Amino acid sequence: MKKVTLKKNLSAAMISLLALSSFGGTVHGESKTGINADAAILVNAETGKIVDKYNEDQPLGIASMTKMMTEYLVLEAIDKGKIKWTDTYKISDKVYQLANAPGLSNVPLRAGEAYTIKELYEAMVIKSGNGAAIALSEAVAGSEGEFVKRMNAKAAQLGMEHYKFVNSSGLSNYDMLGMHPEGTDVDDENMVSAEDMATLAYRLIKDYPEVLKTSGTNYKYFRKGTDEEYLMKNTNALLKDRAYSFKGADGLKTGTTPFAGSTFTGTAERDGVRYITVILDAKDQYGQPSSAERFIQASKMLDYGFTQYETAQFTLEDTETKDALPVQDGKDAEVKISVDKPIKVRMMKKEIEQADVELKLDEDKMGEDGKLLAPVKKGEKIGELVLKNDKKAEYILDELQQDQKVNVYASSAVEKANWLVRSARNIGEFLKDIF
């Protein structure tokens, strides 16, 4: 799943030569969806299973998708009570200059003005405000340099492997007017692999699902009713009523710089099923970077997940045992069993037909002959229904590669038969064996 790959700055000719030599990096085949980008991935947001991928382990420029890690750390600080949404932060001169620099994505911020954490967060998530992101980094960590250290530490903690964060906004350091974070160089860039961006998106949605309420907001006024009123338009064109609207889309983040090209981490949910897709440096049919193509290709990948996979349900009926088990030494010969919910998982049709489902009973409740031991209480957990994981399947985190399980319970009670009844049964079995 994790591979050593070639660096972005190799020319196309060198890549071709290296691929043919014994010293070349991993040679990646085409994705199932025919994506035209430097890297891409499609992931089931519930299980972390990789559905489609291309060059997914190569660290590449991510531009403003960097703000997803800033979002995570801000939401974590809120969750831990270190800051509150209503807290205010008086912006620094650095933030003021970068928030008003020509050519950079921003919500204009005034010199010496105090803004709430909520205002800055919404400006960052919806409008991709670079100044707002830097202000939040200072509010959380005291300085952007210290915040960058926390970004990289959090990436390691989340299980990411191919990453380098150098600022909180996703700007190229050389565009920061000489004010790039302490400990970084002017030529440094934020670089993360497609798989690690999917991992970050997965953890962001799992740990702080409220992020989707803001990332899914199409338009919102900044400081409405004041002389700073500013209409923020979300940069995500997959949202409802936008140019490339995709049903169920509600996040997450775009990114664009000359270094990174056009990038996008998208997510959509339909009927309780969610997918995450990452597109790094999308290209058009002529091989040129294309802002539109990141949305077109993200839609293609998301559509593949929703249409080529279906939700399969597995119950006790999919096992040899069905819905009853024999009971040893019970007044009744068997007991009905049930699960509180079926196992639900997204699979291709051929995978459903080949699924390995089994009933695993708790060993301490079984007799020598494999029967349940009486007495059995109604509602007692007696084992698990297990859907074996496909060992060939890949996941964004190794820890997610595990069997799917639900508890199995006794639907009724079976009392233990008295000594006389058990003796009569034993004699009957003995005579049956003789004759």
Image (tube, rainbow, N blue to C red):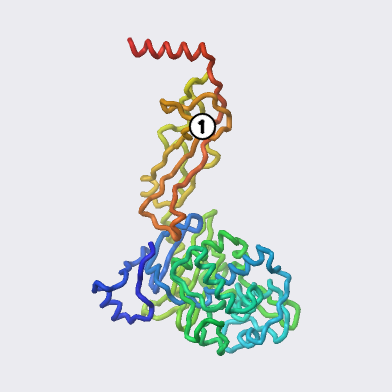
Quarter occupied by residue 218: bottom right
Q: Quadrant of the C terminus?
A: top left
For the image, the number of numbered tags is: 1
Q: Position of residue 163 (x, y in %)?
A: 46, 72
Q: How far from the left and from the top, in percent, is residue 399?
A: 46, 55
Instruction: Classify mark 1: helix, strand or loop.
Output: strand
Residue depicted at 47% across the width and 85% down the height: 187
Give left or right: position of 22 versus 133.
Answer: left
Does residue 271 sit above or below 279 in this rendering? above
x, y percent for residue 249: 54, 64
Foreground residue, 110 or 217? 110
Q: Is residue 310 above or below residue 417?
A: below
Residue 50 visible, this orientation: yes
Q: Nearer the viewer, residue 95 or 420?
A: 420
Residue 178, image x, y percentages: 55, 89
Q: Tell me the quarter of the image containing the N terminus.
A: bottom left
- Pick the front one: 348 or 99: 99
Furthest residue toward left: 21
Label 1 sits on what residue type?
Ile
Q: Which residue is mark 1?
A: 337
Residue 306 in view (yes/no):
no
Q: Residues within 10 Å of mark 1 (few under 14, many from 20)?
A: many
* Residue 63 drawn above or below residue 342: below
In this picture, residue 371 sits left or right of residue 138? left
Between 279 and 392, the one lying in front of the other is 392
